[in-house]
Amino acid sequence: MKITNIVIKSFFSLMLMLVLVSCYSFTGSSLSPETQTILVRDFPNNAALVNPNLSQQFSTDVQNRFLQRTTLKGTKDNPDILIEGEITDYSIAPTSISSPTNTGNGNFMQAAQNKLSMTVKVHYENKKEPEKSFDRTYTDESTFSSNLNFTSIEAAQVKIVNERIINKIFNDIVANW
């Protein structure tokens, strides 16, 4: 008798879990089911400091994020979602100063850390749910030791900043946080 009760309870528990799972989407997406296509246009680099690979890399990374982590399909014609914009700032600046060093000609200040900053303006248009469309600016940065040669670490620093900005864009559009 006990085994029968356990089997029955287990069966009903399993059925309840299946019903609940069918009612919930694990994607966490706030996009409507009617939203099926996306177009990500190139983000031109209009910053004063130009990284020749930045525009293509950023645009491709944004497109890949949406195609890989949603059910959206890429299209060139009449997309349900349009994402476009421009890179407006790309700069390297010191963030902290090390102890003064006497060089014989007086004190010399040296940066202990530098930061790479990037700002992107984004235009998001949702044709299925126009009230969700927006224009926003996203900024992020990555700090690194001034002892490092920037040209040798630039690609890694750009990847960090791109990833952070794309996470923010993706969350604002798909997760609607």
Image (spheres, grey):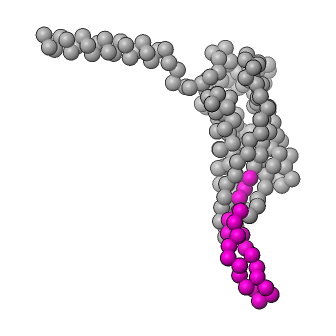
Q: Position of residue 167 (x, y in %)?
A: 64, 39
Quadrant in the picture for the C terminus: top right
Residue 64 in view here: no
Q: Is residue 96 magenta?
A: yes
Number of marks drawn? 0
What residue is rendered at 67% in x and 19% in y?
36
Q: Quadrant of residue 123?
A: top right
Q: Position of residue 115 (x, y in %)?
A: 71, 58
Residue lying at the far bottom in this picture: please name it.
104
Where are the magenta residues, as a range? 95-117
What residue is rendered at 26% in x and 13% in y?
9
What residue is rendered at 31% in x and 11% in y?
12
What residue is rendered at 65% in x and 61% in y?
144
Q: Is residue 117 left or right of residue 88?
A: left
Q: Position of residue 124 (x, y in %)?
A: 76, 29
Q: Is residue 113 magenta?
A: yes
Quadrant in the picture for the N terminus: top left
- Which secondary structure dominates the residues rendered in magenta? strand
Q: Is residue 46 left or right of residue 154?
A: right
Establish if 155 lies above or below 101: above
